Structures are given as structure tokens and as C-alpha cells.
Image: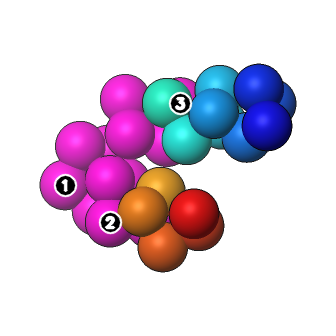
Amino acid sequence: MGRLAGKVAFITGGARGQGRAHAVRFV
């Protein structure tokens, strides 16, 4: 789960708008 959290954080940081939506969809 730690790895996933890091990935989500990276995506969110990379693109706040779309990145966040994708991160939420991933989870």
C-alpha cells in the first residue's frame, strides 16, 4: 500500500487537476 500511496502522491503532484482525478480513480 505504501508504494501505491507514493505513486498517487506523485501523480497528484505532477498534475493537480487531471492528476488528482486519475489518482482517485486508481484507488
Task: Tell me the chief SS of the magenta region.
Answer: helix
Mark 1–mark 3 distance (CA, rounded to whole Å): 13 Å
Q: Which residues are magenta?
A: 10-22
Q: Is residue 22 left or right of residue 27?
A: left
Relative height, residue 24 to residue 9 (above, below) = below
Q: Position of residue 13 (x, y in %)?
A: 37, 29
Please rate how many residues cluster around mark 2, counting C-alpha atoms within 10 Å: few if below 14, some from 14 to 19, many from 20.
few
Mark 2–mark 1 distance (CA, rounded to whole Å): 7 Å
Q: Tag 3, which secondary structure?
A: helix
Viewer-closest of 14 and 25: 25
Please identify, in this view, whether the residue under mark 2 or under mark 1 is nearer the observer: 2
Answer with the quarter of the image where residue 12 lies. Answer: top left
Q: Which residue is mark 1?
A: 17
- C-beta proximity under 8 Å, tags 2 and 3: no
Residue drawn at x 32%, y 66% as measured from the top left: 21
* In magenta segment, residue 16: yes
- C-beta proximity under 8 Å, tags 1 and 3: no
Q: Is residue 1 left or right of residue 24?
A: right
